[in-house]
Image: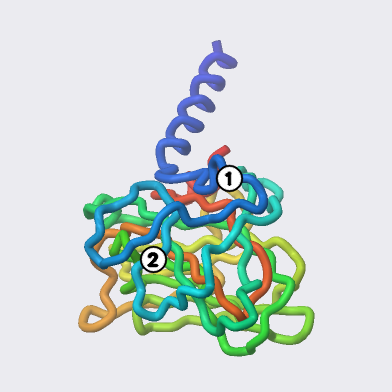
Amino acid sequence: MKRSVLILSLAAFVLSSNAQVLKSNLLNGYKQGDILEKATYNKADAPIKIDTWCEAFSSQTDKNAGSPITGQELSYEGYTEKGVSIKIGELPENVKGSRFSVYSISEKNDYCRGTLYLSFLANFSSVASSRLGDFIALSPVHTGGNLRARVYVGKIDDEHIRFGTNLLRVNAESFKSHALNKTHLLVLKLDYKKNEVSLFVDPALTAEEPQPDVVAKGDEDNNKLKGGIRSISFRNRDDLTGNVGNFRFSSSWAGVIAQ
């Protein structure tokens, strides 16, 4: 009897955790070397292409950059998301700057309260600048832009990097050193009630949520976390080289660690 109760309890926990995973397997159907973007948003209010990687609408995009392509598989012990990644860097020689791609998840305010978590893996072989540069962000626009929370990376030395985040114009950076050429688990957390954005780097995947590495705390006037998240933004940059992928979008820490 006790064993049956335990099995049922574990099953209920698994179902509950999985229910808190809002989006996963964002590169389903891709194989290594595939073109990432399936379509282009030519205007800010273009009809949504739900659960699809598209070229973001942006006046800053260099059209000569071309779509990113998918790269090698990444993995992190204890983290369930598997599969190919997105190559970052390797832009054509005549292209300088960056290009945005977006994964559209909603055209409504479906994700605008409580907590939201974007977890993913990143492995950099080269980071050119000591200044923090963003490469992943969350946007309230399904075609991209007006970024709410970003993940940054910067160079410490030839073998080490550091990460940071922000909430609109409030920046928060960590000076903790992390290795190049190593796969890192990054978890970006939005907390609407606390009006803050947190970043976890290589956190312990335990049932209890650990302390974040860095927190960007907003204010009630100019830096308030509001509006729903409608897309995940990937910024391909000429000053970074590596791979990013294995995304999961969840409503709780239990969703991040769910098997």
Residue at left 70%, top 86%?
156
User: Can you tell which mark lies on residue 44?
Assistant: none
User: Can you tell which mark lies on residue 56?
Assistant: 2
Measuring from the top left, give residue 217's x and y in whole percent. 37, 77
Which quadrant of the rendered structure holds the C terminus?
top right
Tags 1 and 2 touching, CB below 8 Å: no
* Colour basis: rainbow
Tell me if mark 1 has few (under 14), some (14-19) or many (20+) residues whose alpha carbon lies within 10 angstroms of its own: some
Which quadrant of the rendered structure holds the N terminus?
top right
Question: With 133 as the anchor, is 140 left or right in this view?
Answer: left
Q: Check disc 1 and report the residue beneath it.
A: 30
Observer-nearest of 155 and 26: 26
Give above or below for 150 relative to 206.
Answer: below
Observer-nearest of 8 and 173: 173
Residue at left 50%, top 71%?
235
Three-letter code for the amino acid on which mark 1 is drawn? Tyr
Residue at left 45%, top 52%?
38
Q: CA distance from mark 1 to mark 2?
A: 19 Å
Three-letter code for the amino acid on which mark 2 is drawn? Ala
Question: With 73 as the anchor, is 40 left or right in this view?
Answer: left
Q: Secondary structure at mark 1?
A: loop
Measuring from the top left, give residue 209's x and y in whole percent. 52, 55
Tell me if mark 2 has few (under 14), some (14-19) or many (20+) residues whose alpha carbon lies within 10 angstroms of its own: many
Residue 2 visible in this rendered orientation of the protein = yes
Q: Earlier in the sequence, mark 1 or mark 2?
A: 1
Q: Quadrant of residue 180?
A: bottom right
Residue 202 visible in this rendered orientation of the protein = no
Residue at left 53%, top 83%?
97
Give above or below for 129 relative to 67.
Answer: below
Measuring from the top left, give residue 88's x and y in whole percent. 61, 68
Measuring from the top left, give residue 19's x and y in whole percent. 41, 36
